[in-house]
Image (cartoon, helix red, strand yellow):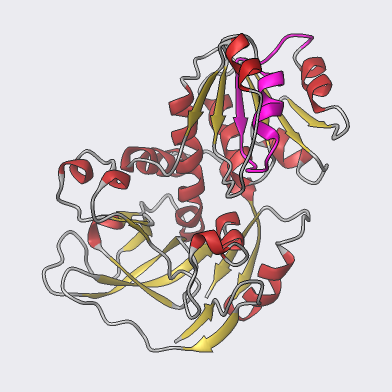
Amino acid sequence: MKAARFTGLHQPLVVEDVPEPTPQAGEVVVKVGRCGICGSDLHMSEDEAFGSVPGEVFGHEFAGEVVALGKGTEGLALGDLVSVIPLKSCGTCAHCIAGEVQWCEGFGLQGGGYAEYAVTRPNQCVHLPKSASLADGAIIEPLAVALHGVRLSGMMPGDNVLVLGAGPIGLAVAFWARRMGAAKVAVQDIADWQRERSLGMGADAFLVDPADPVAASDRAFGGAKPDIVFECVGVPGLIAQAVNQVRNRGTILLLGLCTRPDTFNSFAMLSKEVRLVTSAFFTRQDYEDALDALSSGAAEPRMLVTSTIALGDVPQVFEGLKRRTDQCKVLIQP
């Protein structure tokens, strides 16, 4: 089969012929129908902190058709269309049963979606209803990540929300905040690329003022401060900025993936009694709720998808996404 493989840090991916996977006991093979290119994939190709290994196949946002079953698999049949939860787990421990698979001792990250076929486990497969497409199945993961963050933030109906970063996660946060009753949602970025998409997905305002982002958010909320600031970028300095933007006793929720050291004035945070909360991954319930939103007719999340490409185009497009453009979520159709 064909697969786009990682060859080394700062090097383009390469599409190569590799052996088709064979399921071992307790595994299934999925014919990949759609796979999203995630910002974390871009980081994995550039930052040694992720430990990417040459020959590795990226791609954790994928959906497809079950085409092979290993011994002992249950709950799936050949031909089933599934979205794959990219969190490896045993499926039987107390954490897995509770749907909090990120705490499983066997936890790991599922890749392999930049290929024609991928191996996974039955407990990671969520059946797609007829009302959800394969493209829907490939955007459930970022929707679930955002939903998990909104829930951890403690957002209540009527809260004012500021989202830093207009990437897929930031836009998904805006969608959930609006859907869950936020009074006002503002999205702030350093460029204007995603203005219309942000407004279409639930934002009331889109802010671009790199010279004075705090003043811009103050104006957007009528001189007040938002109840919650979601940091969805992962760039040093944004926590300190968020401290200046959030109200007294407000909440800063970290979703941005930052591997570099960061500093902020803890006295400023302490003085305002700001609550700093971190969010990583999601629960199975978050994943299923994201799918339910799509399958029940929510159209806004589909606005994340800006293009669909062939597997052969992955290396060129992947490199292009390392620079800011009007692209948002690119899907691969192997």
Question: Relative to 212, does residue 329 appear above or below in the rendering?
Answer: below
Please name whichever residue, 245 or 158, is drawn nearer the observer in this view of the structure: 245
In the picture, measured across the screen, residue 90 lies left or right of residue 289, that is left
Residue 216 locus on image (x, y percent): 82, 23
Q: Is residue 50 left or right of residue 262?
A: left
In the displayed image of the protein, which residue is found farthest to the right?
Answer: 211
Residue 179, placed above or below residue 38: above
Left or right: 203, with 213 as reference point: left
Q: Quadrant of residue 26?
A: bottom left
Question: Residue extending furthest left?
Answer: 72
The percent position of residue 44, horizontal first and vertical second, equals 56, 63
Position of the N terminus by quadrant: bottom left
For the point 24% across and 48% down, which residue is it?
Answer: 104
Asked whether 161 falls inside the magenta stretch, the response is: no
Q: Position of residue 136 (x, y in %)?
A: 49, 53
Name the residue at 74% across, 32% down: 188
Query: What residue appears at the point 23 percent right and 70 percent down from the top-left corner?
Result: 27
Q: Which residues are magenta?
A: 222-246
The vertical placement of 178 against 42, above or below, is: above
Count numbered badges in the picture: 0
Q: Is residue 268 among the parts visible in the rendering? A: yes
Left or right: residue 297 compared with residue 67 = right
Give the quarter of the image for residue 286: top left
**In magenta segment, residue 238:** yes
Report whether residue 300 is seen: no
- Residue 85 x, y percent position in the rendering: 36, 54
Would you place residue 90 above or below residue 17 in this image?
A: above
